[in-house]
């Protein structure tokens, strides 16, 4: 029996060839000087199909969650990698093959597939005493933060009664609470939303359910001390289409970029809806804050469908090179009569995977860290066409001065999402280290680079070599040692 992964862009090249490597590596090689003050764990998760896809090809977002933990202490780094032992992974391993069909379409699964369809592949976050592996289609899985042993589905002792749970919860730096939400909260295609506020010791403090005008992807959110903002990307859900073998999501070029603004201390009837321009794609939020009675939300916005694997009804997907995207600011005025909102650009270049100094989540702030793309920089032709999610700069963007400070790693370098680590617990905002995985598309090598946030252009103070290739990932987080 042959079982080869297809040679499609989703499964080949330095970024997307499956890895499937679980590992323990003590004391990685380090080039340069890793500051001993960086103590804690960098967790990240990559979609990484355990088996070649049931239907011959598949999308990146449907890979099984593979968690990596980089443990930093005393100027050294060790690496551990484990699959999240989801029901879905275990069922596949029992049969020795993929059992799952189209992304988030259980109607396309083999009858032997697990009932729980989640891959837990989008982010990992240590909260309380567990590491949560999350995907927005189901409840999280908990793992042991040290051993990465999978502990099981995590519903906060039965308190979270939603079918789904976001992969982009936020930690309120003022209270330490976890602010989270669910969309399609009563199951596939339901327009139900739920908002949850959970305390560090695991108590559900707040729960607000409300209905959206339609079911659409709500991938991320933004918080302030008094509000939570939900961006509805114009990718809608239709269960009948799924039953016919279609995609979970379909791009709707005529729908506005929709936002729900929920007062955190209010009720469902307090939700305010705002509409932005049509045919726009709201990306990941950088941050949000309140000022003079207004709510500002900063995020990259693209003028078309970024997700080529979720086409519009007639099958059209824009050529990625025709899409332009910049960091933009949405300002919501709750006293305004109009429900229309227009974002204004903050950068003039393409960027994504924005991260803030999380001590300032929801508060007035000045510093953003993100991946960006400069098309004028050299690119090694032998690497083939630029892969999906190709970013050749690691950038510090100062929102007050408008100055960008970036490092270009060379003609084959591609970054994965960065994290920001403060220099010390009481360091000024944005003063610390920016840490990111860097893939070399030519020689298939991977390293973890550590830059000083005050001087990005000079490049890394330390480069941590990884003795195998790290597949492309989505998100991760920093957990400071106690
Ligand atoms: C995203 C990623 C997902 C997903 C839905 O980056 C949205 C956006 C890795 O899975 O299921
Ligand atoms: Fe995301």
Image (tube, rainbow, N blue to C red):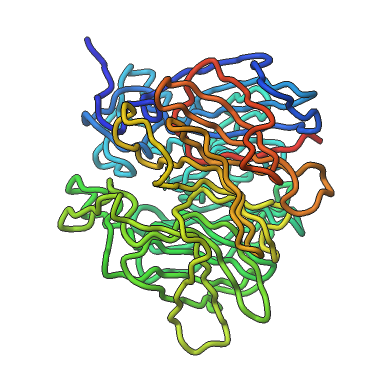
Q: Tell me the residue at 67%/39% (across/down).
A: 478
- Is residue 281 visible in the rendered image? The answer is yes
Residue 304 sits in quarter: bottom left
* 197 vs 359, nearest the viewer: 359
* 354 vs 403, nearest the viewer: 403
Q: Tell me the residue at 82%/42% (across/down).
A: 424
Location of the C terminus by quadrant is top right
Q: Tell me the residue at 47%/62% (across/down).
A: 193
Residue 63 sits in quarter: top left
Residue 169 sits above or below residue 260 on the image: above
Q: Residue furthest right?
A: 426
* 184 vs 365, nearest the viewer: 365
Q: Tell me the residue at 62%/69% (across/down).
A: 227
How far across and down, in percent of the image, does residue 452 sit? 70, 40
Residue 457 sits above or below residue 321 on the image: above
Residue 225 sits in quarter: bottom right
Left or right of 56? Residue 81 is: right
How far across and down, in percent of the image, does residue 203 sit? 70, 52
How far across and down, in percent of the image, does residue 123 sit? 53, 41
How far across and down, in percent of the image, does residue 130 sit? 66, 36
Q: Residue furthest top?
A: 1
């Amino acid at each position: 029996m042959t079982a080869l992964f297809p040679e499609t862009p989703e499964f080949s090249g330095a970024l997307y060839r499956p890895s499937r490597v679980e590992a323990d590596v003590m004391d990685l090689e380090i080039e340069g000087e890793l500051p001993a003050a960086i103590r804690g764990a960098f967790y990240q998760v990559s979609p990484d199909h355990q088996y070649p896809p049931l239907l011959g090809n598949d999308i990146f977002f449907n890979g099984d969650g593979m968690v990596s933990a980089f443990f930093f202490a005393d100027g050294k780094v060790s690496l551990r990698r484990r699959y999240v032992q989801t029901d879905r992974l275990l069922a596949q391993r029992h049969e020795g093959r993929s059992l799952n069909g189209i992304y988030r379409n259980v109607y396309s699964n083999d009858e032997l597939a697990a009932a729980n369809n989640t891959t837990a592949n989008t982010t990992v976050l240590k909260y309380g005493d567990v590491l949560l592996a999350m995907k927005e289609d189901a409840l999280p899985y908990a793992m042991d933060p040290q051993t990465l042993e999978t502990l099981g589905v995590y519903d906060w002792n039965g308190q979270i009664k939603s079918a789904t749970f976001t992969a982009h919860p936020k930690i309120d730096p003022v209270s330490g609470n976890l602010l989270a939400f669910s969309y399609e909260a009563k199951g596939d295609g339901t327009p139900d939303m739920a908002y949850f506020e959970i305390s560090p010791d695991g108590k559900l403090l707040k729960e607000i359910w409300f209905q959206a005008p339609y079911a659409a992807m709500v991938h991320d959110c933004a918080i302030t001390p008094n509000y939570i903002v939900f961006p509805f990307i114009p990718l809608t859900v239709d269960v009948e289409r799924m039953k016919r073998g279609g995609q979970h999501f379909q791009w709707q070029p005529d729908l506005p970029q929709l936002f729900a603004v929920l007062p955190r201390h209010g009720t469902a009837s307090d939700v305010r809806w705002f509409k932005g321009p049509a045919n726009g794609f709201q990306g990941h939020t950088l941050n949000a804050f309140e000022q003079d009675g207004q709510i500002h939300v900063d995020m990259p916005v693209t003028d078309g469908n970024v997700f080529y694997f979720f086409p519009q009804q007639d099958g059209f997907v824009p050529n990625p090179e025709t899409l332009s995207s910049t960091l933009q600011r949405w300002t919501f005025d709750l006293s305004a009569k109009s429900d229309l909102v227009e974002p204004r650009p903050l950068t003039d270049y393409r960027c994504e995977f924005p991260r803030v100094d999380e001590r300032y989540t929801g508060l007035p702030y000045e510093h953003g860290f993100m991946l960006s793309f400069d098309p004028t920089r050299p690119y090694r032709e032998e690497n083939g066409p630029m892969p999906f999610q190709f970013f050749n700069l690691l950038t510090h963007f100062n929102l007050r001065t408008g100055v960008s400070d970036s490092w270009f790693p060379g003609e084959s370098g591609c970054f994965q999402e960065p994290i920001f680590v403060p220099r010390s617990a009481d360091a000024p905002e944005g003063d610390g280290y920016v840490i990111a995985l860097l893939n070399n598309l030519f020689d298939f090598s991977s390293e973890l680079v550590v830059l000083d946030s005050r001087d990005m252009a000079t490049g890394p103070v330390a480069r941590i070599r990884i003795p195998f290739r790290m597949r492309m990932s989505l998100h991760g987080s920093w957990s400071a040692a106690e």
